[in-house]
Amino acid sequence: MSAVRAQPVSFGPSYATRLEGTLRGGVYGAYDEDADEAYDLVRLVDYARYARSGTGGGPALYTRAGPIQQMTLGPAGHLVHFFRSNTAYDERTVGAEAFAQTDRLSLGLFTDNVLVNGVTGGRLAARPFPGDGFAAPLASTEVGLTAVTDLGLRDDRYADSLETPTALALDASYDATSPGGIALRPFASAAAFADYGWGAGAGAALSGDNFARLARFAVRLGLFYSSDQFTPGAFGALYTVSNPRARLADDSALRAEAPGERSASTPLSEIGASAGWRLGLRLLFFERFELRSSYYGHLGDQDLSRYHLRLFFQTRDGRARLFVRLDRGGLDHVFSVFGAADDQTAVTFNADYRLPFDLGGTGVWAHLRTRYTFERLDDGTGGVKRFLPQRRFEPSVGVRLGL
């Protein structure tokens, strides 16, 4: 296989932009999915972001365009947890997100497609008690309201509007420790879908934003109860390939030449009442290493446990880089995380290494790209989108030219 990749980059004190495009080919010709529709021009946007600290007056502001990555709303992630818009890589969408914050208010908004025709939501949070005149725990209290819907399922093609996931969540948290240093923030959350079920949860997060001036960390534990037709983090990493109008086709059924209408995942409408727990970890060593991990343990008869992992590492000289992303659903217990990849597994494994010689002053790099993603099949009954697991393994050696 041969490939040409272009990656223009522009950055300044408050903004950064990177475009990325790849054309691949092999003995069977060009890989058509790289450039077979007009939206592929939008997919060239890897990211375009702008940030303002707010120290000079006005709110702190952050905006970003690009594929949505590991989006989580609220301290419990009760509705949106590790959501991403590039789970099915060839069908990925470029979204947008924005966040603004003042001393008393914060507002976060996102959509998984700049055409605003997919999963769209936001969270408004307020600190109702000013710092002067109130005890520290009360002054640090934050109350948030999250709203999420899937605009893509409000299309005229889908007559049954009850299948459109629309949900609200209310959360509250406060700092149980003295300001500064390591913080312990208990939280509580309640969430409900308009036409499905509801859930409640509580927990606490232990975090440090600048531990020993070397690292940032957070440990989060939550306990949840859910009614029928509800699960925490329903808008998650696999939502784009498994929702009321999309399903993961059962791979074994297809291999047996069956119609493939059977789903490899459990629809929201068929989830029973249950309890569950979630343990999350984040560890960041500035500029060098980042680990994010989250496991949701479903306490019920159905296989609804989930696991998420993000790992990034680069050497001090920048010669070697590693990025790993793993999303798993349909697990029956915590040890299933270490089992073989099944139909509800998405993996990205990227490794780059600059070889210890140059070619005419130009660096020579070895690349490894492994992606467990999903490919779009023909639509099923009623226009339901169907996806099938797809495995890609793309090692290469290339010359990187800086222009």
Image: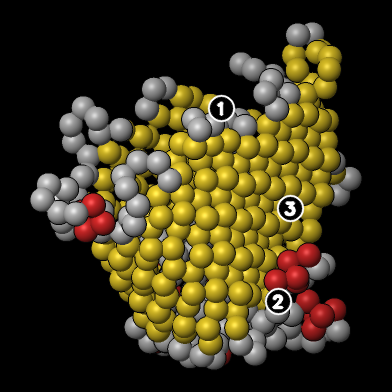
In the image, residue 31 above or below residue 19: below
**Disc 3 versus disc 2: distance between alpha carbons?**
25 Å
Ranked by sequence position, the earlier of labels 3 and 2 is: 2
- Label placed on residue 333: 2
- Label placed on residue 8: 1
Colouring convention used in this rendered image of the protein:
secondary structure
Q: Residue at x 42, y 37 (%)?
A: 49
- For label 3, the residue is 371
The kind of secondary structure element at disc 1 is: loop
In the image, residue 200 above or below residue 215: below
* Quadrant position of residue 246: bottom right
**Disc 3 versus disc 1: distance between alpha carbons?**
23 Å
Name which residue type carries label 2. Answer: His
Ranked by sequence position, the earlier of labels 3 and 1 is: 1
In the image, taking residue 390 as reference, residue 148 lies left or right, namely: left
Instruction: Give the label, 3 or 2, closer to the camera.
Output: 2
Asked whether 59 or 153 is in front, the reply is 59
Name which residue type carries label 3. Answer: Arg
| Quarter the N terminus occupies | top right
Instruction: Give the label, 1 or 2, closer to the camera.
Output: 2
Asked whether 162 or 276 is in front, the reply is 276
- Label placed on residue 362: none
Ranked by sequence position, the earlier of labels 1 and 2 is: 1
Q: Residue at x 46, y 36 (%)?
A: 210
In the image, taking residue 6 as reference, residue 282 lies left or right, namely: left
Q: Residue at x 47, y 83 (%)?
A: 225
